[in-house]
């Protein structure tokens, strides 16, 4: 019997995949537990449509990510901060500050996608990677200089 998985099933497959399983396994376990639906008639056509729409969505996301990666890679953020003796900052620059600065430039990035090992606590120029999509991590240049 052919079924379409509605949830990930260990040792069988992931959500959205079509699998051939024994009738008993499908009728006694997968379907009652709402882990799968029968791949007959309308469900099969909906499955094929779902695959096509998912591919289209992935393609669109990839194009948007490439545009964002290009913009991030060509961006230089200048952060003016209060500085004490010896070039030490009052406070620090963290992922939240970087995300907000990118947001002011029209580039929306989640602060959790910014790869900053530890907050920036001194003056200088830094390169910080931003994870846009799997395999796509452009670097934004951050220039930290004294305010005023």
Image (cartoon, helix red, strand yellow):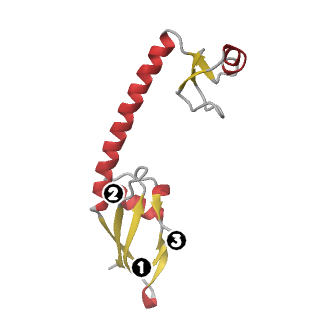
24 to 95, vertically: above or below: above
Task: Report x, y in % for residue 7.
Answer: 60, 29
Q: Secondary structure at mark 3?
A: loop
In this figure, which residue is indicated by the disc labeled 2?
104
Q: Is residue 105 visible?
A: no
Counting residues from the start of the chain, the first of labels 2 and 1 encountered is 1
Distance Cα–Cα, label 3 vs label 1: 19 Å
Quadrant for the C terminus, please. Answer: bottom left
146 to 96, vertically: above or below: below
Of circles 3 and 2, the one toward us is 3
Residue at coordinates 32% horizontally, 58% vertically from top-left?
A: 72
* Side (left or right) of 24 relative to 121: right
* Side (left or right) of 124 relative to 18: left
136 to 18, vertically: above or below: below
Labels in figure, total:
3
Q: Mark 3–mark 1 contact, CB under 8 Å?
A: no
Q: Mark 2–mark 1 contact, CB under 8 Å?
A: no
Quadrant for the N terminus, please. Answer: top right
Distance Cα–Cα, label 3 vs label 2: 23 Å
In this figure, which residue is indicated by the disc labeled 3?
118
Counting residues from the start of the chain, the first of labels 3 and 1 encountered is 1
27 to 71, vertically: above or below: above
Of circles 2 and 1, the one toward us is 2
Residue at coordinates 36% horizontally, 55% vertically from top-left?
A: 103
Q: Secondary structure at mark 2?
A: helix
Task: Report x, y in % for residue 68.
Answer: 32, 51
Crowding around mark 2 (Cα neighbors within 10 Å: few <14, some 14 to 19, many 20+) is: few
Which of the 4 quarters of the picture holds residue 61?
top left
Label number found at residue 82: 1
Counting residues from the start of the chain, the first of labels 3 and 2 encountered is 2
């Amino acid at each position: 019997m052919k079924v379409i998985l509605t949830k990930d099933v260990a040792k069988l497959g992931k959500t959205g995949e079509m699998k051939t399983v024994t009738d008993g396994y499908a009728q006694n376990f997968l379907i009652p537990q709402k882990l799968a639906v029968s791949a007959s008639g309308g469900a099969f056509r909906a499955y094929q449509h779902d695959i096509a729409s998912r591919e289209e969505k992935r393609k669109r996301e990839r194009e948007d990510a490439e545009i964002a990666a290009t913009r991030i890679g060509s961006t230089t953020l200048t952060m003016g901060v209060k500085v004490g003796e010896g070039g030490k900052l009052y406070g620090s620059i963290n992922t939240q500050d970087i995300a907000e600065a990118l947001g002011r430039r029209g580039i929306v990035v989640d602060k959790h996608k910014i790869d900053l090992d530890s907050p920036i606590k001194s003056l200088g120029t830094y390169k910080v990677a931003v994870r846009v999509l799997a395999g796509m991590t452009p670097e934004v240049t951050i220039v930290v200089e004294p305010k005023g």
